[in-house]
Image: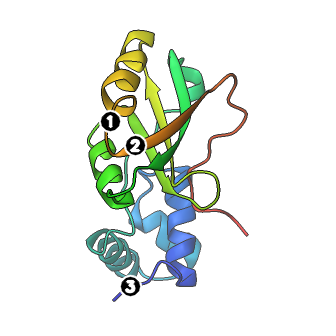
Amino acid sequence: MTSIDDELNRAIIKMLQVDGRRSYKDIAKELKVSEGTIRNRIQSMKEIGALRIVAVADPTTIGYKADAMIGLKVAPGHTIEEVSKRLGKSVDVVYILWVSGRYDLLIEIVTNDQGNFLEFLETQIHGQLDIASSETMPGLKNFKNQFLLKYD
């Protein structure tokens, strides 16, 4: 089974992060391996869910109307996984992280419309029995958004 921790796989991923349409031939040439090796490595990483090649739009240039982080405390009798699955069904929720400390979960919501944002809060957060408390932190300015494999 292929591991993302493998040095060659990390190099392939870094190259694809710059240009997801880069050819196997070009990647192989630069990494000094065969084209077949690159094809097999990419396919293996896709199969185990370690790699997806998608288009990524920069949210700072799109101009979303509402972006907020929401800290959540899960109510007694409910699980973090249960709340995460429920909230994860929303297309506006782009990030869910189980955290320790003040909150149980930290989620990010991004919407194109302030009305959608308020509706999400009303229907998915406030008054839900599985959420004990929440703190909404609206985004004011995004200085960095890099959900990429970190470089050494």
Rounded to the nearest angstrom, the CA distance separating label 1 from label 2 is: 6 Å
Within-10-Å neighbours for mark 2: few <14, some 14–19, many 20+: some
Task: Determine the image quadrant of residue 69.
Answer: top right
Q: How many marks?
A: 3
Q: Secondary structure at mark 2?
A: strand
- The residue closer to the viewer here, 55 or 15, is 55
Rounded to the nearest angstrom, the CA distance separating label 2 from label 3 is: 39 Å
The disc at residue 131 is: 2
Q: Vertical placement of 56 versus 118: above or below?
A: below
Q: Residue at x 34, y 18 (%)?
A: 119
- Which quarter of the image is occupied by the C terminus? bottom right
Residue under label 1, please give it.
128
Residue 46 on image: x %, y %: 31, 68
Give the label, 2 or 3, closer to the camera: 2
Q: Vertical placement of 39 versus 51: above or below?
A: below
The disc at residue 2 is: 3
